[in-house]
Image (spheres, rainbow, N blue to C red):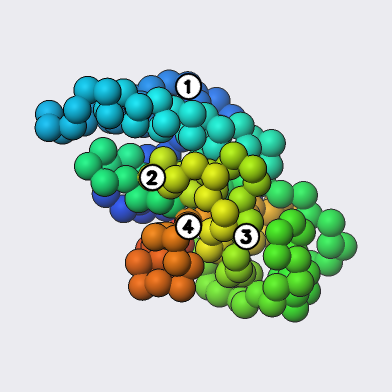
Amino acid sequence: MTAARGYSVVLPQGWARVPLRAGTREALDREVFRRVDRLPAQVPRDQGMAYRAHVRRTVERMVRDARRAGGLDLYVPVRAARPLPASFVVAEIPHGLDAEPEAALARYAAGYRPGPGEGTPGELRSVGDGLAVRWEYVGRAADGEDAAGPGAGTGAPASRRVEYVLPVPEDPGRWLAVSHATPGDGDLGSPYTQALTDLFDAVMTTFRWTY
């Protein structure tokens, strides 16, 4: 079998992909900013301008943060009527475990993970044609950070986060992390917040490697 060259996911209606390695500005203008320019006519002009400025600041900050974390793609909801407070990033991550993928996944699932939530137990899940480790935990947002996306309020104090880590098939040493964050409605245990988490898990059931 040859090594995977990429991946694909099926997005919910109203979501957009922003590539982070090339074509970022074009994708932002076409897929995100142009959509929020088409707000309903009943929205007051000053309110619409403030909303557009907020979306630009938020998404551009998310792009910078995702790039620093090795991001490949950023996914955000851009439905203007009622944007969802959620987002997820696909990133290439350094893999420091000297083990075959199956053994490394088992060690990850036992609790090892870099970054926020270290020590949180993981679980093995089937993703694409292989296995991944999934974590779910509460993460604290940095000062001024919108951890979830265009629909989130500024400075969200915490978010529910879900992360999948999986090896790239037939390409030793290359791993991906797919990370989702949402503050939900401010209650991290509410049905609404849970529904946004479930939506991301549903997207991950569509994950496929491309060759």
Report if the CB atoms under discs 1 and 3 are less than 8 Å apart.
no
Query: Mark 1 or mark 4, which has the lower sequence index?
Result: 1
Query: Mark 2 or mark 4, which has the lower sequence index?
Result: 2
| Quadrant of the image occupied by residue 70 | top right
- Residue 139 image label: 3
Q: CA distance from mark 2 to mark 4?
A: 10 Å
Query: Mark 2 or mark 1, which has the lower sequence index?
Result: 1
Q: CA distance from mark 1 to mark 4?
A: 27 Å
Q: Residue at x 27, y 23 (%)?
A: 46
Question: Quick one: 169 or 21, which is closer to the camera?
Answer: 21
Question: Quick one: 190 or 167, which is closer to the camera?
Answer: 190
- Residue 183 image label: 4
Q: Amino acid at mark 3?
A: Gly
- Residue 151 image label: 2
Q: Residue at x 60, y 65 (%)?
A: 138
The residue wearing badge 1 is 25
Q: CA distance from mark 3 to mark 4?
A: 10 Å
| Quadrant of the image occupied by residue 6 | top right
Q: Amino acid at mark 2?
A: Gly
Whether residue 118 is visible, yes or no, is yes
Residue 129 image position (x, y, % from top left): 52, 66
Residue 139 image position (x, y, % from top left): 62, 60
142 vs 29, left or right, is right
Query: Mark 3 or mark 4, which has the lower sequence index?
Result: 3
| Between marks 1 and 3 in the image, the one whose residue lies nearer the viewer | 3
Whether residue 205 is visible, yes or no, is no
